């Protein structure tokens, strides 16, 4: 499936992939430019549950998404309640392995969080890597409207219970959703208000089939998200 012959004239990069809307738009921008060659979609997953970190999407759906896009995954499995020091160690080990393959550039879908960008740039620079941000400082409202107008399709799989009510979990990203977002919620969910799973659009050779499952609420006592509560809409593989 992934037997593509790499173009030696193009710079190899790894894309930090969540499977969501912003990742997709950043990947679309990168691929459209035709300058960089994305060798892998790097994704962190729960070691215990085999789901995308913070998004809760099943690994099986992530794999179908990767196959439809045509770029292989590079998976990092993280144990539950992993501290930042241990997280950084695992990421460094992965990046050093990729560096042995001639990759020293990471692509991110961040939009405007300065502290997050600084963290990424600093962490990568320690290993001789550079970080690129194709969506940096783009207007969130314009970006999500561009996402919709290009024909991408996505569903909200996780919403911050302190910012949005349960009814938002499982909704499609469309104009109706944007109209219903409360004041103060970023249209792209850049502050962590919501996370999404993209299942169709210009990057895809075929839609990712799935069925909506139950919506559950979970609370996470985590270093970065102290006692944060999220509503998760489970997506089930469709056969």
Image: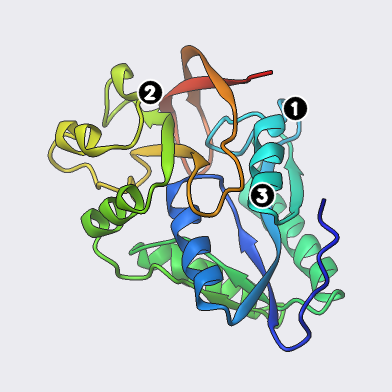
Task: Report whether 110 appears left or right of 15.
Answer: left
Task: Report whether 198 appears left or right of 37.
Answer: left
Where in the figure is residue 209, as x and y percent of width and height? 59, 27
Badge 3 density bin: few <14, some 14–19, many ≥20, Cα 10 Å: some
User: Does residue 207 lie above or below 167 as drawn?
Assistant: below
Camera-side mark, 3 or 1: 3
**What SS does tag 2 mark?**
loop
- Name the residue beneath numbered marker 2: 169
Quadrant (top left/top right/bottom left/bottom right) for the C terminus: top right
**What SS does tag 1 mark?**
loop
Q: Find residue 48 and name its label.
A: 1
Judge by depth and name the residue closer to the eye, 121 or 207: 207
Q: Earlier in the sequence, mark 2 or mark 1?
A: 1
Judge by depth and name the residue closer to the eye, 169 or 76: 169
Residue at 38 percent of width and 43 percent of height:
192
Where in the figure is residue 153, as x and y percent of width and height? 42, 40
Residue at 29 percent of width and 67 percent of height:
138
- Name the residue beneath numbered marker 3: 43
Task: Report whether 238 appears left or right of 141.
Answer: right
Camera-side mark, 2 or 1: 2
Q: Earlier in the sequence, mark 3 or mark 1?
A: 3
């Amino acid at each position: 499936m992934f037997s593509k012959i790499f173009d030696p004239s193009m710079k190899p990069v790894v894309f930090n992939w969540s499977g969501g809307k912003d990742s997709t738009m950043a990947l679309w921008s990168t691929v459209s430019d035709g300058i960089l060659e994305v060798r892998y979609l790097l994704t962190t997953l729960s070691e215990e549950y085999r789901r995308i970190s913070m998004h809760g999407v099943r690994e099986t759906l992530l794999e179908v998404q990767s196959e439809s896009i045509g770029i292989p995954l590079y998976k990092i499995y993280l144990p539950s309640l992993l501290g930042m020091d241990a997280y950084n160690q695992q990421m460094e080990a992965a990046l050093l392995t990729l560096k042995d393959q001639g990759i020293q550039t990471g692509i991110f879908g961040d939009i405007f969080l300065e502290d997050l960008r600084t963290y990424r740039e600093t962490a990568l620079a320690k290993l001789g890597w550079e970080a690129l941000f194709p969506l940096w400082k783009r207007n969130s409202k314009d970006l999500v409207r561009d996402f919709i107008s290009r024909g991408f399709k996505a569903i909200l799989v996780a919403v911050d219970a302190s910012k949005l009510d349960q009814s938002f979990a499982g909704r499609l990203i469309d104009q109706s959703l944007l109209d219903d977002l409360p004041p103060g919620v970023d249209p792209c969910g850049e502050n962590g208000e919501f996370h999404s799973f993209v299942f169709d659009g210009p990057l895809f050779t075929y839609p990712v089939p799935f069925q909506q499952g139950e919506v559950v609420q979970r609370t996470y006592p985590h270093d970065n998200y102290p006692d944060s509560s999220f509503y998760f809409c489970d997506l089930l593989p469709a056969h």
